Amino acid sequence: MAELLRVERLIAGYGEAHVLAKVDFTLEEGRSLALLGRNGAGKTTLLNTIIGVTTHHAGSIHLQQRDITRLRAEKRAPLGVGWVPQERNIFRSLTVEENLTASARPGAWNVSRVYQMFPRLQERRRNLGNQLSGGEQQMLAIARALMLNPKVLLLDEPLEGLAPIIVDELLAALRRIVTGEGMSAIIVEQKARKVLPLTDEVIVLERGAVTYRNTSEALLASPEILEAHLSV
Ligand SMILES: Nc1ncnc2c1ncn2[C@@H]1O[C@H](COP(=O)(O)OP(=O)(O)OP(=O)(O)O)[C@@H](O)[C@H]1O
């Protein structure tokens, strides 16, 4: 399988502060990665560094062999870095459908395909962003990122703060997106047992460094390791 993303000896943070300490990992095309770690471990900082909004200190990031380490954030999205931030940056004063078409790029994902993935969004297509429930907003944030037809989708705690029934609905959609449609993805999550069943691989961050990597299946089968790294 072809290499999609390669992060090497990456040191990054905010201003002078170093949050990531020599992070290394690779992601192949069509594969998905769970990014786990306790609060403050640096998960969001790693996603922010891949999208290009932190201070780079050392190391490199390659997307399909292209060095994007020093590329500005706005140049990375068109190259295929799709981002679903924790705060779900939807346009609250636009309708669902306007949100979807506002920044769409041509490709396999279009409005009808994302409506198939999220039928609730089709039902709500004329509603404004601010009229949606938290779960619907999260679906819209993911759908908007898909409309950019990215090469890799970066999802920052997509299940956070949602009711259990919505969590299950979103997990089912994410499973279809990453396993059914073969979308490459990195999913940051606190709830390891929710995200491991739908990802191929996992890395655990502790104090900005990768302290564990394996297949998701292997980590799920090792409760003692889950406990040691994550206290879950
Ligand atoms: N904008 C910022 N400026 C300075 N330091 C920051 C900033 N954002 C985060 N940090 C610091 O970077 C470290 C890692 O935070 P980060 O948000 O990446 O962790 P996380 O693993 O995503 O945690 P959480 O699960 O709580 O979101 C923390 O010590 C945090 O205080």
Image: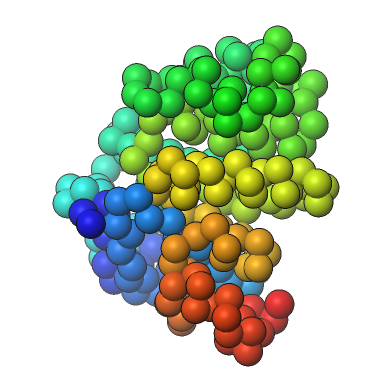
Q: Nearer the viewer, residue 49 or 132?
A: 132
Can residue 104 be seen in this snapshot?
yes
Q: Nearer the viewer, residue 62 or 191?
A: 191
Q: Is residue 196 left or right of residue 201?
A: right
Can residue 44 be seen in this snapshot?
no
Instruction: Name which residue lies at 43% across and 26% down.
Output: 109
Instruction: Name which residue lies at 66% across and 25% down.
Output: 119
Work out whether 38 lies above or below 15. Answer: below
Residue 118 location, x and y as percent?
63, 29
Q: Is residue 220 left or right of residue 63?
A: right
Instruction: Name which residue lies at 41% across and 44% down.
Output: 183
Work out whether 56 lies above or below 126. Answer: below
Q: Nearer the viewer, residue 27 or 156?
A: 27
Instruction: Name which residue lies at 80% across and 46% down.
Output: 165
Residue 59 location, x and y as percent?
26, 65
Q: Residue 115: which quarter of the image?
A: top right
Q: Is residue 24 left or right of residue 161?
A: left
Count of labels in the image:
0
Q: Is residue 165 left or right of residue 87?
A: right
